[in-house]
Amino acid sequence: MPYLEFRHLTKRFPGVLALNEVSFSIERGTCHALIGENGAGKSTLGKILAGVYTADSGKLLLSGQPIAPPSPLAARELGIAMVHQELAFCPNLSVAENLCLGDLPRRAGFVDRTALRARARAMLATVGADIDPDTLIGTLSTGREQLVQIAAAVGTGAQIIVMDEPTSSLSAAETAELFRLIRELKSRGLTLIYVSHRMEELFALCDHITVLRDGRHIATEPIPSTTPARVVTQMIGRELIAQTPAHLTREPGPVRLQVQTLASPGKFSDINLTVRAGEIVGLAGIVGAGRSEVVQALFGLDAAATGDVRISDRALPLRSIDHALAAGLGLVPEDRKRQGLVLGLNCRENTALASLPELSRFGWMHRTAERSLAERYAKRLRLKTPSIDAITAGLSGGNQQKIALAIWLARDCDVLLIDEPTRGVDVGAKAEIYQLLDELACEGKALLVVSSELPELIGLCRRILVMREGHLAGEVTRSDFTEATLMRLMAGIPAAA
């Protein structure tokens, strides 16, 4: 008898059929991969199991018994917990307070602080987390915060844990620590459902893999019986063929972005770089090397930044977003949900955010022009949405990322700073975004792209600049691109080594 079984699960949202008669089973004590393009239904399936959503029809069976948790608390009582992609803690509360928030220990009508800390320490010990329970959650790194969330699940007796894109914001060291913990939890007999777009992780960690496409179940297979190429074909319904970017066959134009001696105390110093028209230049480095800080400073977001920056040979005053915008500079930030989009606005309104002066007159929006602009870029980016009036928060991560790009395409920026262009995006959407960036370079735009994925930079760029500890460690041209060369520079290892 299967331990956990999904039978004909169906879930609808306004204008979207998120799950359509999905059926498969999961064995006890295994790590089961769940993969599919953005919008395929992976997160929806996990949230139904965790009591966040309720299925419209179909059944969930646990050890042969039907279950239908109406809330996360009800799911927790059944031994089911979810580690969300967007960590949902109160940053101004301590680790202990967050861990026990739903059931604070009391004494004489007041919170029992001694019992609170003791309970939190016991929960953290279940995952080997050496974290002070009195530490504010908001001061922890993403990896440590995620560890607390796993402790909250394991410490309350969860036997099934759904992990939704758990490594999307982790460093290499934090990812390795998470993998160790997952293997340990599995050895204890816990069942893990691992939702991710990162194929190498799934094949390294998981026992079985289930593929969803457009809300339908496509396949469930043991990992040894399939291959990454087969899974990609199942995900997107076609074979994905890698192509050399077209902009690499053309000579780059004049210098569009020139940076000399850019510095910010405690963040980075002596940054010198150029990006030409029709060129994609990569910016690589480990987490904390200063890559995001550099592009934020160029866009005017760093009040302490100094240096000489020129756009098409015109001086760009630093510390001013207005000057950056006027110079034709655009920034697609790393965190699209917090910095790149207003999730409560619809697709049309978000697309127009950077173009409001051109779309308004005397303080009034020209709605026809706004709609026309949004529809043009929705078509160009192949945005999957019921309509451009759909709320952005309800879209998949890949489609949200397309809107974050559309904001700056609509403004027609000459220089684009793009930080992590495909974070949390599936392989099909990645291919579409790579094609879009190539098209922009062919149109004469200058692109500086920050990415933690070396294969992404190697596939896209003409040159890659490597940062280490706030300094430029070197530049690698396309003829010398290898992951080993880039990683040596990132780690500060001499080439002879």
Image (spheres, grey):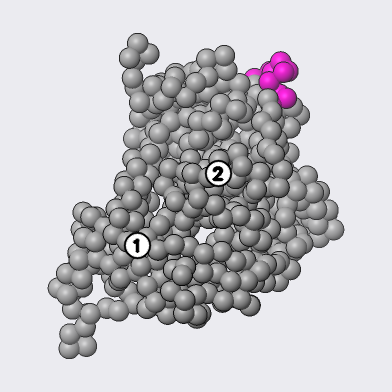
Give residue 173's position: percent from left, percent from top.
33, 40
| Amino acid marked by disc 1 | Leu
Q: Position of residue 42 (x, y in %)?
A: 57, 59
Give the left or right position of residue 163, taking residue 311 as reference.
left
Q: Position of residue 183 (x, y in %)?
A: 33, 51
Callout 2, which amino acid? Thr
Rendered position, 103 above or below 405? below
> Is residue 395 at least partly visible in the picture?
no
Residue depicted at x 56% and y 33%? 456
Q: Nearer the viewer, residue 252 or 244?
A: 244
Q: Position of residue 116 (x, y in %)?
A: 20, 73
Q: Is residue 388 above or below residue 232?
A: below
Disc 2 secondary structure class:
loop
**Dot label at residue 226:** 2
Q: Residue at x 43, y 74 (%)?
A: 63
- Placement of the C terminus among the 4 image quadrants: top left
Q: Are marks 1 and 2 in contact (CB under 8 Å)?
A: no
Q: Which mark is residue 39?
A: none
Q: Residues within 10 Å of mark 2 (few under 14, many from 20)?
A: some
Write down the quadrant of residue 435 in the picture.
top right
Does 53 sit left or right of 78 as displayed? right
Instruction: Pick the residue in front: 155 or 262.
Output: 155
SS at badge 1: loop
- Judged by depth in the image, the label closer to the viewer, 1 or 2, is 2
| Magenta stretch encompasses residue 7 | no
Query: Which residues fall within the magenta stretch?
Result: 245-256
Farthest bottom residue in view: 108
Q: Residues within 10 Å of mark 1 (few under 14, many from 20)?
A: many
User: Label 1 to label 2, Cα distance in Å?
Assistant: 24 Å
Work out whether 89 lies above or below 244: below
Sequence-first disc among 1 and 2: 1
Which disc is residue 190 wearing? 1
